[in-house]
Amino acid sequence: MASLGVAWRSIPPTFLADLRDLVGPRNLLTDPDLTIGHRIDWTGRFTADPVPVVRPGSAGEIAELVTLARRDGIALVPQGGNTGLVGGATPMEGGVVVDMRRLGQVSDLDPVAGQLTAGAGATIGEVQAVARGVGWEYGVDWAARDSATVGGSIATDAGGIRFVAHGGTRRQLIGIEAVFGSGELVSHLPRVEKDNTGYQLASLLCGSEGTLGLVTAARLRLVRPPGPTVVALLGFSSVADVVSGGTMLRLGSRPLALELMTARGLELVCRHLGLTHPFEDRQEYVLLAELEDHGNTVQAVLAEMEGLTASAVALDAASQLRLWRYREGHTEAISRLGSVHKLDVTLPPGVLADFIAEIPAAVAALRPKATVWLFGHVGDGNIHVNLTGLDPDDDDIDGLVLTEVAARGGSISAEHGIGRAKRRFLSLAHGAADLAVMERLRAALDPDRICNPGVLLP
Ligand SMILES: Cc1cc2nc3c(=O)[nH]c(=O)nc-3n(C[C@H](O)[C@H](O)[C@H](O)COP(=O)(O)OP(=O)(O)OC[C@H]3O[C@@H](n4cnc5c(N)ncnc54)[C@H](O)[C@@H]3O)c2cc1C
């Protein structure tokens, strides 16, 4: 077998000719100027040399593509919207980028059962629009909804702002169609939710980051839309009060989102988006709560909340969107500061407040010039630790943060996946036996290791 990860100039011309025949000349890009967007990840931390980009139009074409790649030993790097934040879709070992976005159809909508089938290249926003059109919602949502794809969300088991209400992508998956690295095209897209007929391939592929195969379509569960909602920005001076306020809201109401911001993050977003600060006085920590409210239960809970120092409540859709902009502007505003280390972690509730309060000092002790940005889905214990002012290759600082997380019983990846950014640190999350079983699964399903070889497993 030829070596994997060869730069595109050493890809055999016969391979490129066969690809061109397979997808048509318009769907094979080799001009480096046309492929630049496929070679840089969203954070700017990971960049690759030029590689060809192929745009297959069906699951059958992808099965043939895998056969060709196995024949010539060419790595395949699946890519959806390229909004991943851990370098998982960046072709750093060379090979070929497989742009999945032509598989964008949404079909077989069942408005009674609340299910639909989505091609891997459909965006989350497109799935949400189709679901809303028949009175349902798709339960997973986040700021990159208009670029991120169904295939990417499955490959990373995306979580997002509604996890606290509906869980992540895995919970919405009823069935899957995919091409494994072995070349087999599997298709199990049942119309029923209760289906325990053997191994759940959908679940296995969910979170596999393109390392077992390419997801081509999925059967997705929809959720009922919420009743009237309230969005509130709640100010606190201590993070312990934020966490206990969030717990009160979870027990006393139906939260659809519970998101943390800090004074520093809010100021950056206001500067970046040209927004007026939502409070007159500086609030060290701000909890954005979106709640389903069938009456005045939320007001009653807020009246009892300890440590609450300020609040801004929005009832109508336009004002709610205005409050959401403070939170959704974070990723973009931080990325404007240069290359970002994105460490997306979860902590158990009992140690969450201490971690948030202590991690900036731990980072400052090792890298005094780094700036720590903390925000995220605090209702799930999920905090995005973003670090700026660092060398993109500075893995030691990532190791420090992730070791602190593991020592407290947390997870080093809550929702973005391991990608390239955290590959070195996977043993903080899994023991040798877990990793050995994962390796064997990978070897069975991708025997020539052509599927995203530089990602996930060390
Ligand atoms: C502003 C912003 C906010 C974000 N907020 C969140 C958030 O709240 N929650 C969250 O979970 N994520 C969030 N993300 C990260 C990102 O949007 C998700 O990880 C998303 O699932 C990636 O989808 P994508 O289509 O862009 O995938 P890509 O970035 O293209 O790829 C991601 C990974 O999936 C693999 N892949 C892609 N398509 C396929 C396929 N069809 N088959 C097999 N493997 C595939 C790639 O090889 C890569 O390893 C955010 C990103 C941005 C830019």
Image (tube, grey):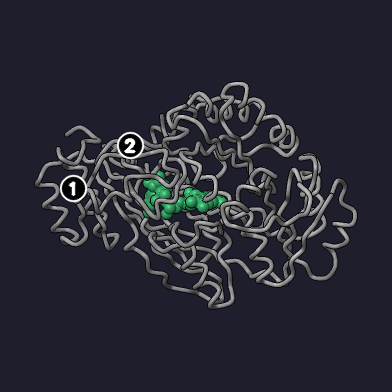
Q: Give amino acid for label 2.
A: Pro
Nearest the camera: 247 or 444?
A: 247
Asked if one can make out residue 158 in the rendered structure from this viewpoint, the answer is no
Label 1 crowd (10 A; few <14 / some 14-19 / many >=20): some
Horizontal arrangement in the rendering, residue 436 relative to residue 137 (left or right) = left
Horizontal arrangement in the rendering, residue 323 relative to residue 98 (left or right) = right
Q: Give amino acid for label 1.
A: Leu
Q: Which residue lies under the disc numbered 2?
A: 453
Image point (62%, 30%), residue name: 405
User: Which image quarter: residue 6?
Assistant: top left
Q: Nearer the viewer, mark 1 or mark 2?
A: 2
Horizontal arrangement in the rendering, residue 363 relative to residue 81 (left or right) = right
Horizontal arrangement in the rendering, residue 171 relative to residue 37 (left or right) = right
**Mark 2 C-beta closer than 8 Å to ligand 1:** no
Query: Residue 390: horizontal and vertical position, in percent?
Result: 49, 30
Query: Residue 277: horizontal and vertical position, in percent?
Result: 70, 55
Does residue 417 lie above or below 214 as drawn?
Answer: above
Label 2 crowd (10 A; few <14 / some 14-19 / many >=20): many
Q: CA distance from mark 1 to mark 2?
A: 16 Å
- The mark found on residue 68 in the picture is 1
Question: SS class of the residue under badge 2?
Answer: loop
The earlier-in-sequence mark between 1 and 2 is: 1
Does residue 24 lie above or below 349 as drawn?
Answer: below
Question: SS class of the residue under badge 1?
Answer: helix
Nearest the camera: 152 or 341?
A: 341
